[in-house]
Structure formats: structure tokens, C-alpha cells
Amino acid sequence: MSQLGQCRLLMRPWLSRNVSSLQWLVLVLLQCTIVNLVLDMADAVCVPQSGCEAAYAYYRAQANETLDSVGAKFQITSDEILAANPAISTHSTIVVDQPLYIPFKCECMQDQLLHMFQYQVQRADSIERIANTVFEDLTQTSWIGTWNKLPDINFILSGDTFKIPVKCFCGDPNVSLSYGLFLTYVVVAGAGANLSRLALEFNTSEGLLMGYNPSVNWNGSTVDQYAFIPVKDKSGNYPSYSSGSKPGPDNAEEEITTAGVLAGVALGVGGALVFLSLLALCRHCVTEEQRSRQQKEHIANKLKDMEENPLCNCKTGYNGGWLSHCSGIQPHR
């Protein structure tokens, strides 16, 4: 082997080590990216993805309100309110605190089931008044600020038109296929008997309410929580859950099952890729440790060989990378 070849041997393991590390890093990052994409596909935030045609909001009539004024606030007609509230027989003046079901379409917006009402700011309004009083906590100040991109929610102008987001729900096939129409209800603060009272008031079971509302803390509620309650339609029946593609009664369960299978497959693939990524990372760490040990032994052996070989005077060092220099054959003395 030539003198220059002997000295370059010192550099070769370091070069291969750097290339291998880069390859493993790219592999791990690629697998993590794939895992995130698969998990995002499996985690369907909107159920169903297209939302649903009908949902209700629970609203209590305020002083001096009529069906027409309530309809104007929620951009619906008084006839639509009457259809959703069969207990009200005429357009006569409604009384203060009278419960009303406000019908609207529930849509998927930015991975959330929402309906976006419109509201024109009045002279005496503030964000808190709009959220807490005008819309009776069906929305929140932070939501209004976010959806309207307000730089300062404490500064609003009379005459501005705001988007008012209200959460809604279309059902959950994992809980029951028998319910597809839901009421958005603001959970009253600090009522330990809220769950049993709501179950009695809306003629449903506590278990069903808990199944549809797993995140609600029924024993220590705040106004920031919302319960979705299954209710009957104007014909007095509970509409069944729909996947959004308007299936018939015979194939509704089949479509839901297919969606569940696809979600399960996506989760399984995601889990397998996570395992493979961890395995690759562990293998990478072990390989690097072994390579480092072999590199140290390699350098020690080569240095020892060169000390015993007077024909090559190699200088090695590290300055951002391994450097080598051969001075050539030493003259005879």
C-alpha cells in the first residue's frame, strides 16, 4: 500500500460514519412524517366529515323579544322557529325565559363542527356582552376574536358585522346509531345534579348524556362547557345518525362500519410505523456506538503501525474534519 493510502485510511471510517448518520436521520424524519400524516387521517375531528343538515341551540327568550326579533338575531324566520318548537302554537308574544330550540345547519369548519351566525355590533355592545348576554354563552369571547381576527377584543366599532361561532354536534356512531339530532346546551355552573336534571328534562338517560359528552365535568361545571343532548324532530321522532352521504336505512350501518374499518387500518399502519421508527432509532444508536468503538481501535492501530514504519511521517488532527498529510520518504541518515 502507498504511503498516501496508508494515511487516508484514517479518514475513511469518519467519512462513512457521517454518511450513515445522515441516512438514518433522513429515514427517521421520513417515518415520523408518514406517521403524523396517517394519524391525522385516522383522527377525524368532524363526525361526520360533512356535518349535518339540522341541529338546535338552546335559547331562552329575553325581555321584549318576539319570535320575529329572535329569528332576526339567528338569521331564521319565525315559521322555522315555530316548526322546531311545536309547543308554541302561534306567533303571539313569547314570555321572558321561555325555552326555544333554534334550528341551524351544522357544518365542518377548520376541523370543528360549527354554525356561523352573523351579528351587527350595537353602540352599547362589548365582546363580553355579545357572547354572554346577546347569545347567552352559546359562544365565547375568544372564539369571536379568533374567527373575526380581532387584534384587540376590547376594541370594537359600532356597525361592524361579526361572525358568531356556535358549536354543534351530529352524533357519534360509537355511542349509538339511533340519534342524529342534537341540541347545544350551555351547562350551568356548579350544579352537581345537572346530569340527572337534564336527563329528566329532556327525557333521556344519564348514561347516554355521559356517552355523548365525555369531556363535561358534571360535578363542577362551568359556563365554558357545552352538552349535546339528543332531541326529537318536529314530527316527534328521534332521527337516526347519518354519515353525511344520505344513506338509506338499509345501508347506514354498512357505511359507518366501513368508515370504522378505514380508521382502524389507518391507526394500525400508524402504530406499525411508530414501532419501526423506534426500532430504527435504537438500531442507529447501537450501530453508532459500535462504529465509534471500532473507529478508536482503528486509529490506535494505524498510529501504532506508522510509528513502527519510518517510511511514512503522517500527521493527523481534527479541525472540522480529519486531516492527513504525508511528508514522503525520509532520507537515509
Image: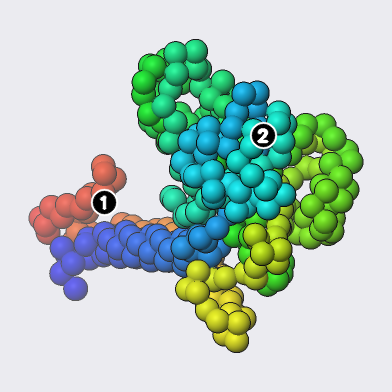
The amino acid marked with disc number 2 is Ile
Q: Position of residue 93 (x, y in %)?
A: 64, 33
Q: Earlier in the sequence, mark 1 or mark 2?
A: 2
Q: Nearer the viewer, residue 239 or 111?
A: 239
Locate the N terminus and report the quarter of the image it occupies.
bottom left
Question: In the image, 194: left or right of 211?
Answer: right
Question: In the image, 24: left or right of 61?
Answer: left
Badge 1 local density, few (<14 within 10 Å), some, or many (20+)?
some
Mark 1 touches mark 2? (CB < 8 Å):
no
Question: In the image, 299: left or right of 176?
Answer: left
The amino acid marked with disc number 1 is Trp
Q: Is residue 101 above or below residue 297?
A: above
Q: Is residue 188 above or below residue 256?
A: above
Question: In the image, 171: left or right of 29?
Answer: right
Q: Quadrant of residue 25?
A: bottom left
SS assignment at label 2: loop
Q: CA distance from mark 1 to mark 2?
A: 87 Å
Q: Quadrant of residue 122?
A: top left
Residue at 52 percent of width and 61 percent of height: 52
Q: Which mark is residue 322?
A: 1
Q: Position of residue 203 (x, y in %)?
A: 82, 56
Q: Nearer the viewer, residue 149 or 93?
A: 93
Residue at 39 percent of width and 17 percent of height: 158
Residue at 68 percent of width and 46 percent of height: 88
| Coloration of the structure image | rainbow
Badge 2 local density, few (<14 within 10 Å), some, or many (20+)?
some
SS assignment at label 1: strand
Please identify, in this view, whether the residue under mark 1 or under mark 2 is nearer the observer. 2
Q: Which residue is mark 2?
A: 94
Q: Which mark is residue 243?
A: none
Q: Position of residue 27 (x, y in %)?
A: 38, 66
